[in-house]
Image: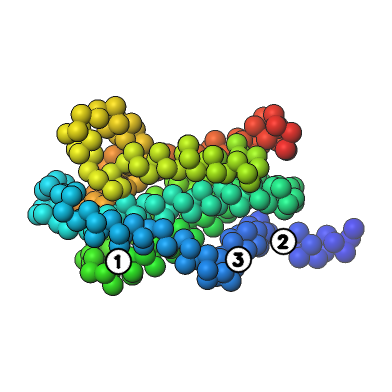
Amino acid sequence: MQSQALNPMAHPPLTLHLWRALRAVVGRELHKFLRQPARLASALVRPLLWFVVFAAGFHNVFGVAIIPPYETYIEYKVYMVPGLLGMIALFNGMQSSLSLVYDREMGIMRLLLTAPLARGWLLGFKLLAGTALSVLQIVVFLAISWAFGVTFEPLHLLAAAPVMVLAAAMLAALGLVLSVYVRQLENFAGTMNFVIFPMFFISPALYPLWKLEEAGALWLHTLASYNPFTHAVEAMRFALHGQWHGMGLAVLVGGGLVCFALALRGYDPQRGWIRQRGAG
């Protein structure tokens, strides 16, 4: 006991402890991702197909009027890019929730949750890992879209970087919340059908919202205006053109905090849904 008290490494300072946990959780996710280049390719195939096929097939169908943040008529492929960036962050956020469900089934999640560290830090590190993976894929897709002729001002890209991080973080936090409810890997397909696809299609990712209003689908327009994914896409769209979308930024920050708080409560073994379902 006396030797442990004299040894400063027996009880490392909190900052060192947090750094080790950060390196273990975030480093594990990044290491797994970088070791699987096919995973990056598969993550980019979906938005790339939409980008190539829809940009060619619907070039003359979806006319984009001069609406903010645009000051002139633009090509449809230019309009699509922010929506596809949102798609990448949305699907990766759900993929992060799937990995949490897998870790829970394999028992790894139980080991993480019993680590001598506050649960909020662990979930925060998982959120940081999911956000980092989304941002990495977004950067790669921006490079691909540049190769297809969609370019943005360098200063606008720098200004849009924090907005993309906030969007990725909010969607990753939503994935944390879903991981509380999704109990088995087999249920993830239902999550795709009832969460991911409605959020993506009832949004301005592929078409302006005024198209829904013009078509008389007012209820869809209302749903889209309350869809947090809508505000994530619009915030990135405005930022990529050198403008700020106040409502979108507020939703990104507020929605991310609310989702993280709900996930933290859900993983609390004393009062959360984990205890109610016998997983804590």
Label whose residue precedes the other's in the sequence (1 or 2): 2
Between disc 1 and disc 2, the foreground one is 1
Q: Residue furthest right?
A: 1
Label whose residue precedes the other's in the sequence (1 or 3): 3
Identify the residue under disc 2.
12
Label whose residue precedes the other's in the sequence (2 or 3): 2
For the residues labelled 2 and 3, the Cα–Cα distance comes to 28 Å
Between disc 1 and disc 3, the foreground one is 1
The residue that appears at 18% across and 50% down in the rendered structure is: 61
Q: Is mark 3 on a helix, strand or loop?
A: helix
Whether the residues at callouts 2 and 3 have beta carbons within 8 Å, the answer is: no
Q: Is mark 2 on a helix, strand or loop?
A: loop
How is the rendered protein coloured?
rainbow
- The quarter of the picture where the C terminus appears is top right
Q: What residue type is labelled 2?
A: Pro
The residue that appears at 53% across and 52% down in the rendered structure is: 95
Whether the residues at callouts 1 and 3 have beta carbons within 8 Å, the answer is: no
Q: What residue type is labelled 3?
A: Lys
Q: Is mark 1 on a helix, strand or loop?
A: helix
Q: Where is residue 86 in the image (x, y as percent from the top left)?
A: 37, 51
On the picture, is 65 further left or further right than 264?
Answer: left
Identify the residue under disc 1.
145
How packed mark 1 is, by other alpha carbons closer than 10 Å (few <14, some 14-19, many 20 or more), is: some
Of 202 and 215, which appears nearest the observer?
215
How packed mark 3 is, by other alpha carbons closer than 10 Å (few <14, some 14-19, many 20 or more), is: few
Q: What residue type is labelled 1?
A: Ser
Q: Where is residue 27 in the image (x, y as percent from the top left)?
A: 60, 65
Of 179 and 148, which appears nearest the observer?
148
For the residues labelled 1 and 2, the Cα–Cα distance comes to 46 Å
Identify the residue under disc 3.
32
